[in-house]
Image (cartoon, grey):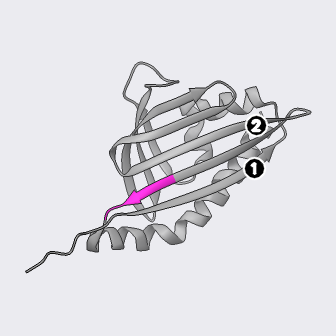
């Protein structure tokens, strides 16, 4: 008897927003883990697990509720002031988040978000995917709107 291989499924979400604020202000806000729950939809917990709180090597444990609670330990794997923040999971749900910042001039900034997440294969993965998929679009929309609203009101 041959066993079917359970293939994980990777999904990618991309979103861009423009914010009426200088790139340094937008970057600092996104880079500050203490503000993340204020704008990232579904994030219920984020706790630093390293003394380093920013930049390459900083790690956080987080829980995001998007249909079901998804846990991960994420690590900053790329960081360039006012240009880029990349976080990749080292434990839990497989995910990479890349936030790119572009100075548009006139104190306007474009933020490009690229998020990939991989759900397990098999029946458990299908159940998680069924719970997560309808929420992803809502999560991206609310996250983008909250980021713009929060930074512009600073």
Q: How many marks?
A: 2
Residue at 75 percent of width and 45 percent of height: 148
Query: To which quarter of the image does residue 4 belong?
Result: bottom left
Front residue of this view, candidates 11 and 129? 11
Residue at 41 percent of width and 69 percent of height: 129
Of all residues shown, which one is farthest toward the front?
2
Residue at 27 percent of width and 74 percent of height: 123
Identify the mark at residue 17; answer none if there is no mark. Answer: 1
Which stretch appears magenta?
A: 116-120
Q: Earlier in the sequence, mark 2 or mark 1?
A: 1
How many C-alpha atoms fall within 10 Å of the one at disc 2: few (<14), some, or many (≥20)?
A: some
Above or below for 24 versus 89: above
**Residue 41 in the figure: left or right of residue 8:** right
Which of the image's four quarters has the N terminus?
bottom left
Q: Element type at marker 2?
A: strand
Nearer the camera: disc 2 or disc 1: 2
Q: Element type at marker 1?
A: strand
């Amino acid at each position: 008897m041959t066993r079917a291989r359970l293939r994980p499924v990777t999904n990618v979400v991309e979103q861009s927003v423009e914010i009426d604020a200088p790139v340094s202000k937008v970057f600092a806000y996104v880079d500050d883990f203490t503000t993340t729950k204020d704008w990232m939809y579904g994030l219920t917990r984020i706790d630093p697990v390293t003394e380093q709180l920013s930049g390459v090597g900083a790690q956080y444990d987080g829980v995001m509720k998007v249909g079901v609670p998804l846990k991960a330990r994420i690590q900053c794997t790329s960081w360039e002031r006012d240009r880029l923040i990349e976080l990749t999971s080292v434990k839990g749900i497989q995910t990479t988040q890349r936030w790119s910042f572009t100075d548009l001039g006139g104190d306007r900034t474009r933020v490009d978000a690229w998020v990939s997440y991989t759900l397990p294969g098999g029946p458990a993965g299908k159940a998680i995917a069924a719970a997560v998929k309808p929420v992803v679009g809502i999560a991206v929309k609310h996250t983008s709107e909250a980021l713009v609203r929060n930074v512009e009101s600073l």
